Image (cartoon, rainbow, N blue to C red):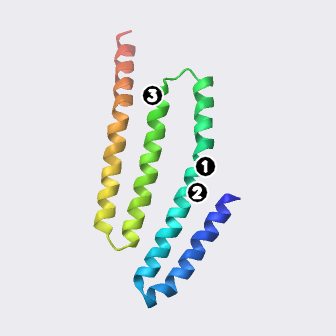
Amino acid sequence: MSIVLIAVIGVTAVLLAVPLKSLKSEYGLYLGITAALFIFLYGLGKLSGILEAIRQMEESIPISHSYLHSLLKMAGITYVAEFASGICRDAGYSAIGMQIEIFGKLSILAVSMPILLALLETLKNFMKM
């Protein structure tokens, strides 16, 4: 049901921002940023359920804590980069939004390197057998 609430808030913010843009464009932008921040913070509230599911996975599957931690970091980087990029694009700064997306992708690549190296080491050991 929370998706319905978020959808209503988003659509309402857009419907209010469109007429405000014709009066003063910055008011529409402020309203859009406020709605986006509210939705972002509401999404962060859902993070406790995700963390609990990850804890259950760690208990049931013998997997290194660092792998799941890296996956969570990657998801967080993606969410924050998309959020910031969207705000920049809405404000008319698409170039900055694209740079944020590129930096987010590079950050995900950097976080995933230890996992990739561990996978390659596992393959190397498997090939020796």
Which SS class for mark 2?
helix
- Residue with the mark numbered 3: 66
- Residue with the mark numbered 2: 42
- Tell me which residue sits at (44%, 40%) in the image: 73
Mark 1: amino acid = Lys
Estimate the x, y position of residue 77 in percent, counting from the top left.
41, 47
- Residue with the mark numbered 1: 46
Q: CA distance from mark 2 to mark 3?
A: 27 Å
Which mark is in front, 2 or 3?
2
Mark 2: amino acid = Tyr
Badge 3 density bin: few <14, some 14–19, many ≥20, Cα 10 Å: few
Q: Is residue 90 above or below residue 2?
A: below
Q: Quadrant of the C terminus?
A: top left
Mark 3: amino acid = Ser
Which SS class for mark 3?
helix
Q: Earlier in the sequence, mark 2 or mark 3?
A: 2
Q: CA distance from mark 1 to mark 2?
A: 7 Å
- Tell me which residue sits at (34%, 48%) in the image: 105
Estimate the x, y position of residue 121 in percent, counting from the top left.
35, 20
Circles 3 and 1 in contact, beta carbons < 8 Å: no
